[in-house]
Image (cartoon, grey):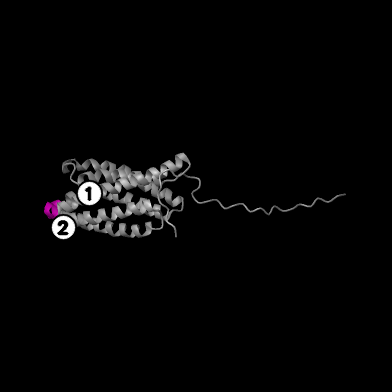
Amino acid sequence: MATTVQIPDTRVTPAPVAGADIADPGPLGLAAFAATTFMLCIFNAGLMEAPYKRVVLPMALAYGGIAQILAGMWEFKKNNTFGATAFTSYGAFWVTYAAYVWLAQPAIIAAAGKAEEHKARGVWLAAWTIFTVLMLLASFGTNKALVVVFSLLTVTFILLTWGVWGAKESIEHLGGWFGLLTAGAAWYTMTAGLLKSTMGRQILPVGPISH
């Protein structure tokens, strides 16, 4: 009687790629960041009157805040530490901005007066300026489009911090203009990622950085 020899299967099954089962959350995060930045900086640049500025708050909470934080969580799923840190943090920036204007700002004005409130905003902006400088350094490991976004954002925060803390309206307006440029660069980078997803190839260049 012939004996059947069982040959063991020695094929190695590739390990699943982290986050391969979800779509790229980058375009969503960039879109939320760009749109909310654009709205706020319209006012920071002095292009619209300050009384209408509160229209930014619902946008900051829902799109710039919640949507961007969700994008950050999905970046964690995709094992993208940079994207997760950026989107989650700037999403929290917009949530705290809305909370500050709705809750903290009136309390500070009531306690210290409107003339002193700018100092509190200056401290808040200074913290985000430091964080953005650190993110700019990290962006040099991504692509040139993101380096442009974070370079412009760094200048924006520096000017806004200087303008707000020092009560220099002209500097704050200049920061608003740089914020509009930042929004434009973020929209470009978002569109590049979106087109790559829908077209299956890189249509808009983002300039990969060679190491």
Q: Nearer the viewer, residue 23 or 98?
A: 23
Whether residue 65 can be seen here: no
Q: Nearer the viewer, residue 33 or 208?
A: 208
Judged left or right of residue 32, residue 196 is right
Residue occupying image coordinates x 41% and y 58%: 141
x%, y% of residue 19? 48, 49
x%, y% of residue 43? 20, 44
- Under tag 2, what secondary structure? loop
Counting every numbered tag in the picture gives: 2
Residues shaded magenta: 109-116
x%, y% of residue 36? 29, 44
In the rendering, which numbered label is found on residue 166? Answer: 2
Amino acid type shown at disc 2: Gly
Near mark 1 (Cα within 10 A), the count class, few <14, some 14-19 or many ≥20, is: many
Amino acid type shown at disc 1: Gly
- Under tag 1, what secondary structure? helix
**Which residue is under mark 1?**
176
Our reading of the magenta stretch's main secondary structure is helix
Residue occupying image coordinates x 28% and y 42%: 59
Name the image quarter holding residue 42. Answer: top left
